[in-house]
Image (cartoon, rainbow, N blue to C red):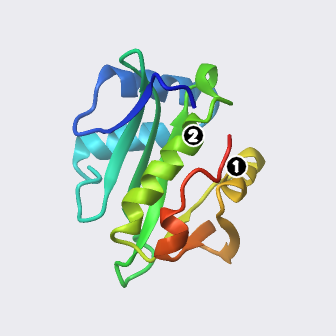
Amino acid sequence: MTPDITITRIAAMSPDVEALEGLAASEGFNFMTRLLAEWRSGANRFDKPGECLLGAFEGGRMIGIGGLTIDPYLPAGDAGRLRRLYVAPSARRRGIGAALVDALLQHASGRFRLVRLTTDTRAGADFYLRCGFSQVDDDSATHAKQGPDALAKRGECLD
């Protein structure tokens, strides 16, 4: 990742998020549309204990986004769920997705014993495997990464 990229917590929706949503929709990804709809309705603001929504910025412009929530599919509340990870096509293959995942896992290591996610693309599955996630056979997740040491480990995934 280039040094002029910053990753910061997002506390409010901005036109940058809407721009990313438009890019994602043009690629056939609807999860950014869901992110905006859930934020606007208050259904998900990434504001429960352990949750966060992060943005990757270059030159003041958001070029990537990713979130972490309590996993709603596991009742104990000690598992997190990686959600809504998206990097603008023009910013891909520069380590931005990996940096977002690293930052989200660092955040998760203080609260969750396990982080899970679902992806429905081969490229996404390959990316998460490179990030140290394991493929799982579960109706509510395709990948998982377990344990505070594994979650806090940085810099192992390349996009």
Q: How many marks?
A: 2
The residue that mark 1 highlights is: 127
Local packing at callout 2 (Cα closer than 10 Å; few below 14, some 14-19, many 20+) is: many
Q: Are marks 1 and 2 in contact (CB under 8 Å)?
A: yes
The quadrant of the rendering that contains the N terminus is top right
Q: Is residue 48 left or right of residue 121?
A: left
Q: Earlier in the sequence, mark 1 or mark 2?
A: 2
Q: Is residue 38 left or right of residue 89?
A: left
Residue drawn 49% across and 43% down? 100
The residue pinned by badge 2 equals: 97
Query: Counting other residues with Cα less than 10 Å from the Cα at mark 1, is it few (<14), some (14-19), or many (20 or more)?
Result: some
Q: Is residue 6 left or right of residue 159?
A: left
Residue 49 picture quarter? bottom left
Picture quadrant where residue 145 is located: bottom right
Foreground pick, 30 / 10: 10
Tell me residue 96's x, y (percent): 56, 35
State whether residue 3 is above or below residue 134: above
